[in-house]
Amino acid sequence: MKIPVMLNSEKVILDARPTESLLEVLRSNGLLSVKEGCTKGKCGSCTVLLDDKPVPSCIIPVGIVRNASIETLEFFLLTKEGEDIISGFRQAGMNMCGFCNSSRIFSTYELLKKSYRPTAEELDRLADSIKCNCIDRKTFINGVIYATANRHEREGRRNALI
Amino acid sequence: MKGRVEEMPSSKTFFYAKNLSDVFYQMKNISELNIVGGCTSFVGKELPEKALSVRDIAELKVIDKHERYIDLGSALSLSEIEDLGEANLPKIFYEAITTIANRNIRNIATVGGNVCGRDFYNTLYAPLLALDARLEFMDGDGSVLQPIMRLEKLPENELLSKVRLPLEEWEVSLFRKLGPSESVNELSASFAFLANSQKNQISDLRIAFAGSFKFRDIDLENKLIGAHLPLSSTAISNFMLEAEDFFNQATSNRKLNPILRHQFWNLVKYSLEQLT
Amino acid sequence: MCAKRKSADKKNFVFSDEFYSDMSAPDMLYALPITSPFSCGKIRSIGFAPKTKVPEDCFLFTGNDIPGEKSVAILGTEVPVFSCGEISYKGEILALLAGPDREVLTELKNSVRIQLDGDELKKEETEFSKNYNFLSVSIDDGFPIEQSIISLRKTIENFTKKREIIARRKIVTGITEEVFSDPEKSAYVVEGKWNSRIHYKSNKETEGCLCYVKGGNLHVFTPCQWLSQLSKTLSEVTGFPKSKIFITRTMVSHKTTNALWFNSILVSQAAIAAIKTGRPVKYSLSRSSQEALLELAPNVQISHKTALDAEGVITAMEISVEFDAGAYNPFASEILDRLAIAATGIYSCRNVRVSAKAFKSHNPPSSLHLSMIDSHSFYAMENQIQKIAAQTGFSPVDLRQINKAGGAQKSTWPFTYSFGRSIDAINAVAIRSDFKRKYAVSRLAGHSRYEESENSPYSPPLRGIGMACAFDGSGYLGTFFEKSNISMQVSVNEEKKVIVHAYPPSSSIREIWIKIITDDIDVDRRSIIFTNETIGESGLKNDDSVIIPEALIGTVSVRTILLKKCIDSLKRKKIDGTPFSVKKSLPSSRKKIWNQEEFSGSPYYNTAFGTCTLELELDTCTYRENLRKICVIIDGGRILSPKSAENAVHRSIQRCLSTLVDDDSLKCPSISVQFMQSEEEPKQIGHLVYSILPAAYASALSQALSVTVDFLPLQTDSIFKICENLTDERKVRREDEQ
């Protein structure tokens, strides 16, 4: 089946069975930042941006993403927002395991998109949502705070964090 | 207008539509067509043989807020509803949404999918029952707004187009999600309790429970309407006995895990104690 | 990502930071395992069902296709590559299906037929019937013949056959029988049976590999933790000499249980397919197979019988350890030794009898996480102490202080440990968590709580607080350690770069090592190079008759200590471009403190001590627990990187909390982690939490419920079932009283 999508800002036609998971289709197209984890949508290893929202690609049949916009980490990390986040994580000394990267990065992106200055509660909820144990909560939250600061700096608003 | 059909040899078939008319046309002409949204209900299960995706139908993603109610399109994702905020939704409904899976899944799961579960009454069902929500079902000829309380089973060949939530203020609003947090099994259920009072008397009371079965009984609720506050321990005990009877009657032909029974009774008791 | 090797690189072992599951090769085949649906039986044949249309480029490989040895010896245990004769456990891999399309393979898998020898099983049925007057199961009962006979055979096994003991360890000091029969010395006798089936699942990359043959060489890409065994196994199974086997160790995303040795079996299977087809083969276990074969809940039952005198001094302990090793277990002896050493926890008394046995069974091979084996013994011992406190009225804190090794009585236990500032740690955690007061209050409230909760809506919540202590030994001087020669070498080259010659550490340990180096030597972190060497290259002596898992040689803390010594020596020399090298080994006297034959002495290079308290409250509406506070205090010697250490402990706590209740992840709003100040050598602390938190949780729950919780993990309705049983018991008691 031919499924037209906007994949990493490029119009492509995915050739796949409509019931195949988006994860399988993306990996077979060489987008390996999308990892196969729990296959139940819980662990987040397969997270991609679908219409600018992080979703678990392992439970999404590719048939329903017709005409949608899909972004994977390969592309996202080249954007300004991706750079803010990955620098922030580096500043916090985060050593991600490689499997949960998409989950942490895209979830952080969603939070920063929604909230200019994430509250402690929002940060806690974000940390709770990440199931991988390769990094402890405090370090991850610090990474998100650094990412927020990077974003403020890029947008010309210094010291905007309390 | 025909939607496109993609057929694969010995495989499932997916259909698409551009608008509601398209949807109805295909529902009329294709037998055993299943309407799907985010497909999160099919995790670990087989997708239907014939599925029509309504993810992109704009008419099903409308949010319409009025003074006394809010209409939510059935193809809205749970996160889109969550992002409306607690101020714009009934508290109990908002609380229930935030307990569903994780944010990423809520970004793709739809409210229609949650309400139209076939083997199980999902998390939102108990709050919708308690709120006296209404569900709008449409076919090509028109629409019907049906109270969820009176819905015995999902109508065949009709599309759930929107969910209407009354926007009332409630003095006591309690929601609890039961069972394991990381999966859905026979121990999973949700409990909703709403109560209002006027001049120190209970003026409105709603108790709902949903999981592998659904429960809400107006006759039971009426037993406490008009009761004076604070409720005495005798009143609570008496009501508990009634609740036990009603619940047992409603579940008499079901093999129910005993913990669910006890959780229901305990939560009713706890909720009533909030009124004291 | 294409799997390529530079032609110039002739090393047989190479390390890569990529995931093997991201790799591919042109013309590659995928492989799926065909597993046994039965736990036992004799295989007559494996093949496709008649009239199955098998695509041309799909293949089925069984034991008959193995060019070399059909089974391999792993630490003396024979493990079949494919099961050919007797099936040993349900899920055992009998064959491998290979083809270019995974979807086609998944469908084709359903057409594979496994025929069992029904006559063999019927013979047993007849014998059993004769001896036990058992109504024989009719094979015409509507179920497939194999299922009837298999279920009967299970019954036969349960009732008739003695379990085969594959490893045994007995430790006896003093005379326990005398003490138990002396009323003065056994003023209190407490018995308990403890079962912890906690296991740590992971959602990361599943085990597997990519194999291909090129230019007469076998190339393998896999997250192997035991390179030498893999090389040996591949050579034996495929017939390729070791010099022609090139292994790239890809990213190891998690250290599961059986993966340590099972990886070589999986890779051998894929290698056979690669050799026979002449094409690259990629073999990845599915998530469900990974959980069934590699991430199993271990089955360890520990029974305690403890005698105390009137002052609360433990006078005798009888401990029985039973470990279901599954169908095979190359590490059965090692596991048993570790369970036995930790059986008495941090306590000592003059009269101890420990009897540890590992049994063979028709379950999938069980291999505990070798760094966390002791946690089962600590779980049992700490819960036993808590039970003693509950039954005798002694304070759990005092009980621990009195009976801790180095406490009131001189130890006759054959093992010696040093627990550093353990007394201070126990006191500190008790003060920090207000343990004594909360314990006393919960205990006082215990006997009347159910009656209260029924009568009054304002009854106090059911609360409990538990405590546990444990040690974490690093550098276990057991069989493997004895045969290895641990050393660390650091050199400086002409470009003033610091080169660390070592087996690759994890990323967090690597960071610690970099910090050690940059703290003491004026060098930029970018000038630090890790050579990532294997055993042979680093010059370690390795007796060919025993191949030691690299991951176990010189555990991280020992190597960290040696690295620190190397850097201390380097500090004294001037880094001016003159190349030089420093090598440090463990002093031979250090190894002599442990006698493996007599099984006595100091089993660890050093031991860290940890203690924790856990406070919880029960939600009597939903029968669930709400954790309120966790306090952890650790004496880990000199902490080289406090922030990393604290983060590591927090991570362990997070991970542990997700295993205590099935399908649920517990949360705790208040977690406090502290380290005791110490100038002692740095010690391993990474696994302490796994030894103390489950016991503290079970103890707290036991106090809240006023009944002993002796098993973990719980289900979401376990607390309800316990409460129901208690309610029934109370009803019966009331009826009796009336």
Image: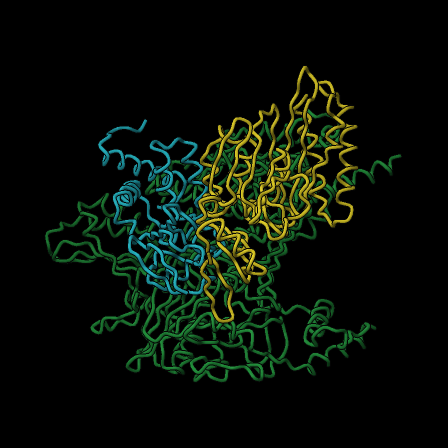
Chain colours: A cyan, B yellow, C green
Which residue lies at the image location 44% right of the left edge and 53% below the top edge?
Answer: C604
Badge count: 0
Relative height, residue B200 to residue B185 (above, below): above
Which residue lies at the image location 47% right of the left edge and 34% below the top edge?
Answer: C424
Which residue lies at the image location 30% right of the left edge and 39% below the top edge?
Answer: A147
Residue C568 shows up from this direction: yes
Q: Residue furthest top?
A: B199
Asked whether C213 or C354 is in front, the reply is C213
Give the quadrant of residue C625. top right
Asked whether C619 or C602 is in front, the reply is C619
Where residue B154 appears, x then y in whole percent?
A: 63, 48
Residue C312 shows up from this direction: no
Asked whether C538 or C253 is in front, the reply is C253
Which residue lies at the image location 44% right of the left edge and 73% below the top edge?
Answer: C31
Quarter of the image for the N terminus of chain C: give it: bottom left
Give the quadrant of residue C678. top left
Relative height, residue B259 to residue B234 (above, below): below
Q: Is residue B90 left or right of residue A106?
A: right
Where residue A64 appears, x then y in whole percent?
A: 45, 55
Where residue C342 appears, x then y in whole percent?
A: 53, 52
Where residue B139 appears, x then y in whole percent?
A: 57, 49
Give the quadrant of residue C722. top right
Quarter of the image for the C terminus of chain C: give it: top right
